[in-house]
Image: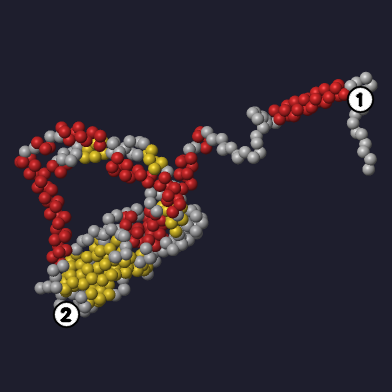
Amino acid sequence: MEERDVGVAAAPGSSSAGLGVGAVGAAVEAVAGVAAMQDDVGIRREGPEPDPDEPPKKRVKIPEGESGKLEERLYSVLCCTVCLDLPKASVYQCTNGHLMCAGCFIHLLADSRLKEEQATCPNCRCEISKNLCCRNLAVEKAVSELPTECTFCLKQFPRSSLERHQKEECQDRVTQCKYKRIGCPWQGPFHELPAHESECSHPTKTGTELMGILGEMDHNHRRDMQLYNSIFSLLCYEKIGFTEVQFRPYRTDDFITRLYYETPRFTVLNQTWVLKARVNDSERNPNLSCKRTLSFQLILKSKVNSALECSFLLLKGPYDDVRIKPVIYHHSFSNDANETDYVPLPISDSVECNKLLAAKNINLRLFIFQVQK
């Protein structure tokens, strides 16, 4: 193939230099036109041309008025789907990943037990249980690092260190005078404590003035020691029996069924017994009540020739974490009076009651002491 000259022929009388100046002028006009078009569509080029091998620059921070702080956005992502608050302890998730704090999770399971329904996630309605749900450790760690405000000094601290700060380090935390035991009612910020104690008038009180305060303290101490002295006295009995009992949930045959618990028959002190328990003293709709309690009764199933006088108490089982304050009950069993009245299970609050209701079974330890005549 032969080459052809496609150049533009110069006009007669023109030179090659004139051709070069004309080409440069046309190029400048083309660049100016492109720049004008970029300005029309909002594209602005400032500074040198970016290097294609340079790493991407960070995103420009969006003003807080438009998107809010990062912490606030994380609150809405990591909060509990039930109470809409950040979890303070364990975090559970359903099979679809929706988060629940430990208190709400236990409450949902307890409500399902009371209503005889399958517990479901409030967001996606999938089934939830202790076997189906698992803890989300990543969310727990993320929440523990989020900042929160101290209620005393109003400074920001990570949630993981807030409790130690409020108990030991905060100079504005509420504290009491060291002479409170002898009647000083003062309480105030920690940084004012040294000044108060140096001027407190209670150390200079006379012995007569202190006797009334000490008498009240002795009364409270004797009341607390009475329970322990009673337990030590029962441990001296000749016939003592204990066993692990398992309360299993059942339903009554009423039109509106009610939840109750009953143990299988067990043998203690050569006698056969059964324990029963009920929620809120068989209230019609205990699931609508915020305050929940459990009460129980001890039933003697064996036939006896003479009255059987016993003391008994329930304690938490070896593998449960529920808090039960021991209370000693007394009853004289016979063939005509073979069951006790319903007595309260001495748990601390409704949260502990929900823990028991959320469990598949309630496992406790029963002690029976036979009184010798």
Asked whether residue 277 is in view, the answer is no
Determine which residue is flagged by label 1: 10
Of the pair 334 and 58, the residue shown nearer to us: 58
Q: Which is more N-terminal, label 1 or label 2?
A: 1
112 relative to 23 in the view: left or right:
left
Q: Which numbered disc covers residue 305?
A: 2
Of the pair 90 and 217, the residue shown nearer to us: 90
Residue 169 placement: quadrant: top left
Residue at 38% over, 38% down: 156
Asked whether residue 222 is in view, the answer is yes
Secondary structure beneath disc 1? Answer: loop
How far across and how far down the image is residue 53, in percent? 64, 40
183 relative to 1 in the view: left or right:
left
How far across and how far down the image is residue 225, in percent? 14, 57
179 relative to 274 in the view: left or right:
left
Amino acid type at image mark 2: Asn
Q: Which numbered disc covers residue 101?
A: none
Q: Quadrant of the N terminus?
A: top right
State the separation of the CA atoms marked 2 and 1. 138 Å
